Amino acid sequence: MEHTSISTSPHQASAHVLLLPLPLQGHVAPFMKLGHQLVRHGSKVTFLTTESIRSQIEKVDEEEEHMRIISVPDGLALEDDHKDDNRLVQSFLHVIPGHLENLIRKSNEDELIGIGQITCLIVDVVLSRDPIEIAEKMGLKHAIFFPSAPGVLALILHIPKLIEAGIIDADDGTVEKNENIQLSPNLPAMDSADLIWKRPGNKSNFNQKDVFQYLLLVNQILKVPNWVLCNWFDELDPSANALLPNIISVGPLPAHDGKSTGNFRSGDLTCLPWLDGQSPGSVIYVAFGSTSKFSQQQFHELAFGLELIGKPFLWAVRSDFIDGISIEYPDGFQDRVKNLGKIVNWAPQEKVLAHPSIACYMTHCGWNSTMESINMGIPMLCWPYFGDQFWNKSCVCYGWKVGLEINPDEDRMVTRHEIKRKVDELLSDEGIKANALKLKELAHNNAYEGGSSKNFRDFVAQLML
Ligand SMILES: O=c1ccn([C@@H]2O[C@H](COP(=O)(O)OP(=O)(O)O[C@H]3O[C@H](CO)[C@@H](O)[C@H](O)[C@H]3O)[C@@H](O)[C@H]2O)c(=O)[nH]1
């Protein structure tokens, strides 16, 4: 679909939006898409992130005429581990209010040449408490952008009730009474084992209490009446608006000129000609986002599984994908699969999912990847790792019925035979394929003409008042 620029009427002053995402890949990328959409709708955008992320973001994000990226220190000392997401987020939460106030004041005083006065702040949910107070104090419009599914936000809002009902512990969210939580009549109940703070991921830097405490903070922030933008479209759950009255669905956020934006790594483009050489609907795409990690043993089992399936595969293997050690494939694996598979460090994912050779996507169910897959009509094999991914998996498999799940019980290894069985089952399920194509159509309608794109135009018009 062609991307046209949407002009504003000449008497409308353009809004200048400051975007402030959490300094993590799964947040920076959708905020960048939001930024490009705002520019297409006639706004100016300043994108605020850390110095280290700014240096990693692909050049494509700086080419936009009305978008500029500004960076501030993340607050960590040189000798600190900047890859420790937990410490990074804690530190950024601490330092960002000071930087933000300074930046808005300078933009008001026109000290930052060429930036011009900032008129609106759109901030990531988890960061939002202090920045929203600052925006209010300095007379800026403000909105929250939530880069996951609204059901997740509804659950967060529901936390006090769960504590009151004795279902979870108030300190770290440990489940005290096993009950399914039905937030929406249209989507599956949330299993208490899958509550988003319950599985911080094997050996990840996050722990359950930290995640739960962030979410409690988010809960307090969301009492502030506001616009809450979500990368989502209404047909995914028509009752989401009732769960969250101030939600505005603006998804799926389209890729900017078909390119992935806000990526910390460059996508390996050599996989595209390789995909061109494969038959339509034949390739299994395997990628687990930016944070999931496998044990060495599980990684080997997945490699054996792909070999056993015997179909072409494209596998994105980040250098930090295995817990604590460098990547080691099973003996002779790369040789044996050289005519079958292509392995890259980081795939140009949106281009890959849009390629006609892709048959299915083995995914961790990060929200961005889930929406990208829905947008391309690709059936998913869900292998969640932590947080919201378990809820996303339930929606994919049991709500929209566009995928199947691999259940990664933390104490159990998923075997090569199970992987093969699930992939075979997915590829032969015509119902799932048809559902995925229906959802794709709805997604495209929302992105380019229907509900979400109208919501976006209305939102931007309000920013310009
Ligand atoms: O080889 C790859 C792998 C990923 N991506 C992109 O990276 C992004 C990954 O985002 P997501 O699928 O959301 O996964 P995470 O990076 O793991 O995202 C974190 O943030 C998300 C948004 O809050 C949550 O839904 C996830 O659970 C959380 O892990 C997507 O845009 C992908 O297109 C690539 O371009 N190439």
Image: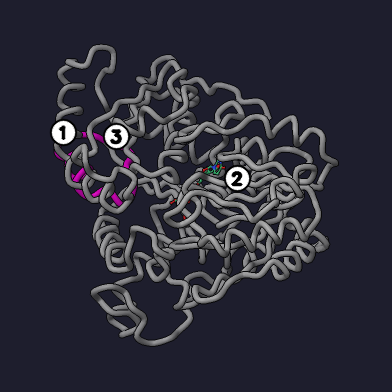
**Secondary structure category for the residue under label 2:** strand
Give the residue furthest to the top.
113
User: For the residues marked 3 and 1, what is the alpha-carbon distance in whole angstroms?
Assistant: 16 Å
The three-letter code of the residue at mark 1 reads Glu
Q: Which comes sooner in the sequence, label 2 or label 1?
A: 1
Q: Residue at x 15, y 29 (%)?
A: 102
**Secondary structure category for the residue under label 1:** helix
Checking the image for residue 50, the label placed there is 3
Does 429 appear above or below 56? below
Q: Residues within 10 Å of mark 1 (few under 14, many from 20)?
A: some
Q: In this view of the protein, can residue 239 be seen by the observer?
A: no
Q: Is mark 2 within 8 Å of ligand 1?
A: yes
Checking the image for residue 101, the label placed there is 1
Q: Residue at x 60, y 49 (%)?
A: 287
Checking the image for residue 316, the label placed there is 2
In the rendered view of the protein, which quadrant contains the N terminus? top right
Magenta stretch bounds: 121-140
The three-letter code of the residue at mark 2 reads Ala
- 316 vs 274, left or right, is left
Number of dots carrying numbers: 3
The three-letter code of the residue at mark 3 reads Thr
User: For the residues marked 2 and 3, what is the alpha-carbon distance in whole angstroms?
Assistant: 26 Å
Rendering coords of residue 2 (x, y %): 66, 26
Q: Is mark 1 within 8 Å of ligand 1?
A: no
